[in-house]
Amino acid sequence: MNPGEHHAHLIETASRSASRGIFVMSRYLSRSPQREAARSAVLHRQLQRFPSRYREAVGSLVMRHPRIADLAASFPALLFALAVPRRGFDPAPAIASVIEGRTLVEVAAAADLPMWLRKLPPEAFVAPIAELPDGDLFRRQIANHLPRSPKHASTWLKIFTDVAAIAHEPAAVWAVREFVRAPVRLNPTRLRLVGLWSWFSRETATVGYGLIEKPWRPEMRIDAALAAANAWRTEISLHVNLGPEPIVNMWLRAGHVAGYDFVPLSSVASITSEAKAMKNCLRTYGLGLAHNRSRLWSIRRDGERVATLRVAIRWKDPLLNIVELEAAGNAKASREIWWAARQWLHMHDLSTIQLDRPSWGAVPLDRCSWLALWRPYWLAKQRIPDWLPIAPSRGALEAL
């Protein structure tokens, strides 16, 4: 038996035991030349590094030819892509190219697999490899941000794949850069929102861009990006909860008391303007406003904003109350402003105000606002993801 035939025999034995996740070769080593034994040991270790659920598939492919087996050490990603092909990809031509002795570059091209994946270890591949970006410039960029440890490799690849699909290549490179810099600071479950925000950050003609206060930039750190993306999501929630029309029933009337004007905040624009000017969290009240849990008012003196007021039902009291009254930056409002607010509130006959308070989730999101917001993304990606459906969904919004 020549060395090539002997090597193929060893691989066949390995494949037969792959279904148990163990590649048993040691009983053959006594009959192998020293070089062949070392080569088999390397192959054994490499195959063991692939995730257990895919070892049988990888082992079955490895036994077909020594050149395929060599991929376990020279290009683990290519071996995996051929053994566990992505949907719609036929690996047969690429496998034939390996057996024919074509170069790795040629085989990778036949498999539509980027050459930069060659640097990833077997531990990275826990699912079929999606189509990924490539090119000389891109390879130079991504080379600086590859995972430093095999234990982070699968998370690294998932982050890159997900962000590249949701957003764009620059955002994907940025995401893995931040992951490599501080793995514990980056929660992969939040990257869907960050990806959407980074995509809309470059689409200046969209409604979504108009709701962004701080756009994505590649020099951002992950904490700043998460904060900006969360602020964008809050603005979206307000936008789709209230829709384009102002709130008709503000429960109370605008008025002027003791030198102070009480101005209704009945629209997305007025609430956003007040929140920015007063540096407060009014934009988080979209859900409560839509479900008639509260109303917001601006208190002004000589046209200048001095405080923000929220009225609602407090505890078991069936009558409206002042539940929040704060100056700019959530600072304590003066006693004088509180007294003016109490007088204004009690100018109304509170006993006649009947509040229809639907159960939480019963009020649908505004369909027109939802479609206007996400349509550019659907068209650009040429798909409507399950996590961003065409029908307005509170569950989808909350899951972002």
Image (cartoon, helix red, strand yellow):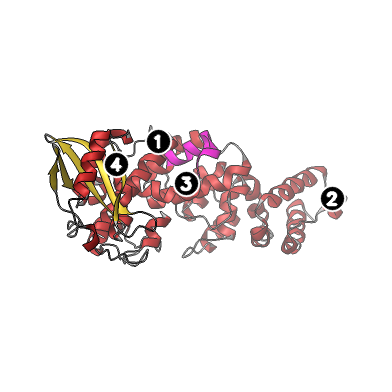
Label annotation for residue 224 = 1
Residue sitting nearer the eye, 144 or 72 = 144
Within-10-Å neighbours for mark 2: few <14, some 14–19, many 20+: some
Alpha carbon separation for disc pair 4 and 1: 29 Å
Q: Which residue is mark 2?
A: 29
Q: First in sequence: mark 4 or mark 2?
A: 2
Amino acid, disc 4: Leu
Q: Nearer the viewer, mark 3 or mark 2?
A: 3
Q: Residue at x 17, y 38 (%)?
A: 300
Q: Nearer the viewer, mark 4 or mark 2?
A: 4
Q: Is residue 358 above or below residue 350?
A: below
Alpha carbon separation for disc pair 3 and 2: 41 Å
Over which residues does the magenta segment extend?
173-187
Q: Which percent across, then down, holds residue 129?
A: 51, 55
Q: Is there a contact, CB below 8 Å, between mark 3 and mark 1? A: no
Alpha carbon separation for disc pair 3 and 1: 19 Å
Q: Which residue is mark 4?
A: 325
